[in-house]
Amino acid sequence: MKREQFSSSLGFVLAAAGSAVGIGNLVAFPVMASKNGGAAFLIMYTFFVFFICLPVMLAEMSLGRHTRQNPLGAYTEIGQNRAWRTVGWMSVITPFMIGVFYLVITVWIFGYLAKSVMGQLTELAAPDSFGSFINSNELFVYMAIVIGLTFAILQGGVKQGIEKAARVLMPMLFVMLIALVIYVFTLENAMLGVKFFLIPEFDKLTGKVLNGALAQAFFSLSLAMGILITYGSYIQKNNNIVHAGKMVAGLSVLVACCSGLLILPAVFSFNPDIQLSTLSESSISMIFTFLPKIFLAMQADIGYFGASFIAGFFFLLVFFAALTSLVSIIEVPVCSLMDQKGVSRRTALFSLGAAMIALAVICALSFGRVELFSNLLSYGGINKSFFDVVYDIFYETILPLNGLLLCLFVIYRWKKHNFDAEISQGNDTFAGSFLQKYVNFSLGTFIPFILAVIFVNTVATIFFGKNLLF
């Protein structure tokens, strides 16, 4: 079966940026930054994106393009043993399980988008609205619509599905984001939020804050999920991987900056005396419990219809970000099944889709509707739902482990000279450059060390309630 390819480097950049720009970048990042040094946090985040995460991105993209394989196929082809094949399986199962809970969150966002469009902003801003919504039967109607949209994009394949959607959705996302930033700047007291976001406070950069900035950078770029290996396998050989990687990293930082200039001014326009310490850094808490109150408060100036329009505009923006990320996540196991079993894209989609939908329904029922799923396990001194378990194991824990193993695999199993040769295709200036030396050195030394520390500390913190670092 002939390998599908992106039509151009731009197509890849937009698709990869779609996977990187998610709800964490748009909503949680601004509050996290404002609480932890403002522009100082943003500077460290940017530093980590380009000096820690970019080498990992290049490793994933190069591995995918060289092997023309999904993560399982890439690790199997070069690894040539059962241990590396197991790592390949981890790199496929992880995005599949992340896709399960991410599908549920995307459904919540779409539900709030629909309710905003229908003029139900007062209902969304009510204190118990979110808890009622996630346990309502209408949730499954929205789930069916989101699944239909996601499958329609994936069914179109790489050029006519993923790339075509990215070429439409990503420019729209950026235009909508900038439009909302411009509007929010017109609100009273908005500049107070800009001040909190852009004035650096370097004294707040503790070890815990730096760890948070690194984790945010790593997770926000969709690293170690197998996405960039899979998308890398669709890149043409004459495309410049380094340039594409820098573009994706730059777009991720740009969205983080713009989201800070959106969320914080909106928060301060709602309450100029608000204490940032009271705000949650959780995307879910901000999107579904706090921001609807801000939108509702806007009715005093622009009327209820205007406030509902702004709310709908915002939720459409976040939905686009969530949908592009969801598509990229699901493409990994779909591509893997197609490559390994030689089945059609349609067969792979329906086979994996049935299992993912079943698990997503269990996730959706684990917020009090079904006791078994709501209190599935207890670890770290906390009772955990099925949703929590999937999130803790596959997103929080296995991702840094996958990143660690990827670095070791590329440098010590695939070997530096093979890695360099692949990146040099389409980039004549890479060989012998400072970037080449830095990428090889960092991937073979301190980046895997940092990821190992994050992995060990995550396991200790989540599963044993012991933070080893702070």
Image: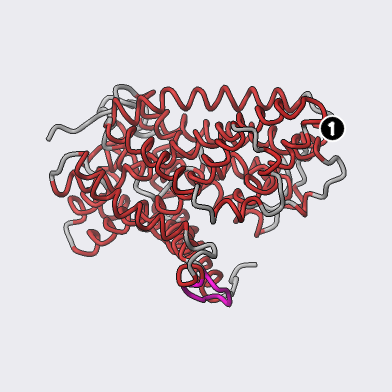
Q: Residue at x 76, y 40 (%)?
A: 267
In this view, 137 is above or below 458: above
Q: Residue at x 30, y 48 (%)?
A: 353
Farthest right residue in view: 273
Return the residue at label 1.
189
Can residue 421 be seen at all in this image of the molecule? no
Can residue 335 be seen at all in this image of the molecule? yes
Please state which of residues 334 and 445 is positioned toward the viewer in this rendering: 334
Left or right: 22 as drawn, with respect to 1: right
Quadrant where the C terminus lies? bottom right
Instruction: Give the magenta part as a residue range.
Output: 375-384
Judge whether residue 282 is colored magenta: no
* Predominant SS along the magenta part: strand
Q: Position of residue 371 (x, y in %)?
A: 49, 71
The quarter of the picture where residue 200 lies is top right
In this view, 178 is above or below 45: above
Indicate the secondary structure of the residue bearing disc 1: loop
Q: Amino acid at mark 1?
A: Asn
Q: Position of residue 406 (x, y in %)?
A: 35, 53
